[in-house]
Image: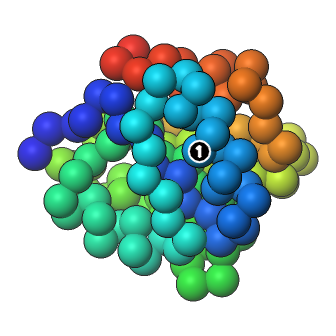
Amino acid sequence: MSISSHLAFVTDDNEINVRVAGALLKRLGWAIETFDNAITMLARLADVQPAVILLDISMPDMSGEVACERIRSRSDWKDIRVIAYTAHAMSEDADRFLSNGFDGILIKPITIASLTGAIGSPGQP
């Protein structure tokens, strides 16, 4: 299955964070799908693979770190960019996220500039 170059997933258990990220992504030209938990998002990956996933670190059902580990364990999902979408801004947190398979970090609250810097435009690596 190929990656959909204009699709982004937003996975966060906070509805406001999902709305903000979704609205900004749409302004940048992305199609989006939203999820309030990692389990549902991982199940959706069996059917469609987005170019990028914004993945909240602190969720009740499964942490973003565990979800990222599951994504990285699958060779058919290796090209999906996974961005830690978090309020955890300490440098040791950032180092841990990057060493555990995340491609980048987006610190909440986000802006259009920080989002563009983290993921770029649809269709671009």
**Furthest residue in direction left, as rendered:** 1
**Is 94 situated left or right of 61 in this image?**
right
Measured as percent of width and height from the top left, residue 117 is found at 66, 19
Residue at the spot 63% in from the left edge and 39% down from the top edge: 23
Q: Quadrant of residue 55?
A: bottom right
Position above or below: 82 against 45 = above
Q: Give the left or right position of residue 61, taking residue 13 as reference.
A: left
Q: Is residue 47 above or below residue 90?
A: below
Residue 57, horizontal then vertical, whole percent: 67, 62
The residue wearing badge 1 is: 22
Residue 21, x across and y down, in percent: 65, 44
Q: SS of the residue at dot 1?
A: helix
Q: Residue at x 34, y 18 (%)?
A: 123
Specify the farthest residue to the right.
90
What's the residue type where badge 1 is placed? Gly
Res. 83 image quadrant = top right
Rendered-image quadrant of the N terminus: top left
Q: Position of residue 105 (x, y in %)?
A: 68, 39
- How many residues crowd mark 1 within 10 Å: few (<14), some (14–19), many (20+)? many
Residue located 39% across and 15% down the image: 124
Quadrant where the C terminus lies? top left
